[in-house]
Amino acid sequence: MPKLWSETIEEHRSAVLDSILDATGRLVHREGITGLTMTALAEASGVGRATLYKYVPDVAAAVAGWQEREIGRHLQQLRSIAHDSPAESRLSEALQAYARLRRHQHGDDGVLHLPERISPAELELTDMVRELIDEDARAGRARTDIPADDLAAFAVHAMGAAATASDHSAVDRLTAVVVGAIQGPFSQPPAS
């Protein structure tokens, strides 16, 4: 198969899958997972049911694909925030952004947050937070009496409480408490 034809087919397949995943997200937010049907998904994505079944075998697969894509986007957004923030506020900015994302997700059906769907993303998030904590520890901005792995796991789980935060101020307070715990009384500027 010529390369141009191959790329065109892949681009088309990617566009169709994106349309299906976009429609899945819209329908889940509007109808909830229990209201999502393959017929509604085909109609909302602009494809026939036969085409839809070529891409996703059932509603659960459509939701899983949509969620995986969204989580990937959120992780990229958090990486960008951490990268673009000043060194002294990277950890705080990334945790606050994560908390706001968690708060935004509150109210979604619980099936969206099944452990097998979240675990790889949570591990990636925890690794990113650990790297930020390591960076802060080297600069004297984070405690070193507790391993960075433990602090990162604590931070990610504690920030999960933002899912039930009443407003942005509550998210800010939660972030301040978690960052304060990570900085702890043991952080100090590195020796010159």
Image (cartoon, rainbow, N blue to C red):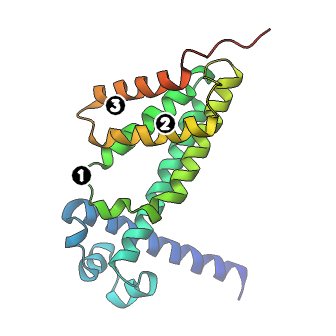
Instruction: Point out the residue furthest to the right here.
Output: 192
Q: In what element is the residue under mark 1?
A: loop
Quarter residue 42 falls in? bottom left
Q: Nearer the viewer, residue 12 or 133?
A: 133
Q: Nearer the viewer, residue 33 or 6?
A: 33
Q: In what element is the residue under mark 3?
A: helix
Q: Where is residue 178 in the image (x, y as percent from the top left)?
A: 45, 28
Which label number is shown at residue 171? 3
Q: What residue type is labelled 3?
A: Val
Q: Residue at x 48, y 71 (%)?
A: 15
Q: Nearer the viewer, residue 186 or 21?
A: 186
Q: In which quarter of the image is the C terminus?
A: top right
Q: Residue at x 32, y 87 (%)?
A: 49
Q: Position of residue 91 (x, y in %)?
A: 55, 29
Q: Which of marks 3 and 2 is in front?
A: 2
Q: Nearer the viewer, residue 130 or 2?
A: 130
Quickly name the residue at label 2.
155
Instruction: Point out the residue furthest to the top here.
Output: 192
**Total numbered circles:** 3
Q: In what element is the residue under mark 2?
A: helix
Q: What residue type is labelled 1?
A: Gly
Quickly name the residue at label 1.
107
Whether residue 117 sits left or right of residue 81 in the image: it is left
Q: Nearer the viewer, mark 1 or mark 2?
A: 2
Q: Earlier in the sequence, mark 1 or mark 2?
A: 1
